[in-house]
Amino acid sequence: MSVWVLIYRVSAALIIAVFLIWAGSLFWPRFQQAHDLSARQLELEEEIRRDEEVLRHLRLKQQRLLNDPRFVEKIAREELGLAKPGETVFKFVDETAPSNTRTGAAGRIRP
């Protein structure tokens, strides 16, 4: 094999490599943009699904408020804190930090 054939093949390979790198650099931003848009589409479809579920739940609640007097009473009592005339309402409050009666001020356990 002559030196000129080797130089011709190497230069042809380099030209092809440069062309492929150039073409890749031209189209890479488009591929990245398409990938980002696809990911965004999936996020929006999931958000739409969640919103449709909330809407379905609210419509069901609306129907129950229009047609079910016991449900209206339950909502009035639990969410609005209303009571019928003459009723006494008791509210129980849980303590957020229960005190430990078995430990003293120094943290020792009392007998």
Image: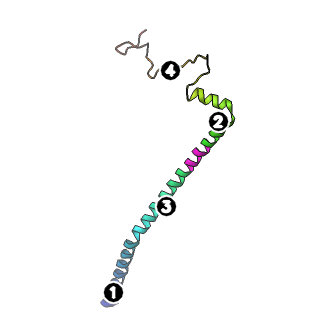
Rendered position, 17 above or below 33: below
Cα–Cα gap, marks 4 and 1: 89 Å
Between label 3 and label 1, give the one nearer the viewer. 3
Classed neighbour count for the residue bearing mark 1: other residues with Cα under 10 Å, few (<14), some (14–19), many (≥20): few
> Could you tell me the amino acid type at mark 3?
Ser
Report the magenta stretch's main SS: helix
**Distance of label 3 from label 1 (alpha carbons):** 46 Å
Mark closer to the observer (3, 2): 2
The disc label shown at residue 38, or none: 3
Residue 52 sits inside the magenta stretch: yes
Amino acid type indicated by mark 1: Leu
Q: Which residue is located at x 41 percent, y 10 percent?
A: 110
- Looking at this view, name the residue that lies furthest to the front: 85
Q: Which residues are magenta?
A: 49-57
- Which residue matches tag 2? 65
Query: Circle 1 sits in a helix, a strand or a loop, which is it?
Result: helix
Please indicate whether residue 35 sits to the left or right of residue 66 in the image.
Answer: left
- Closer to the camera, 36 or 4? 36
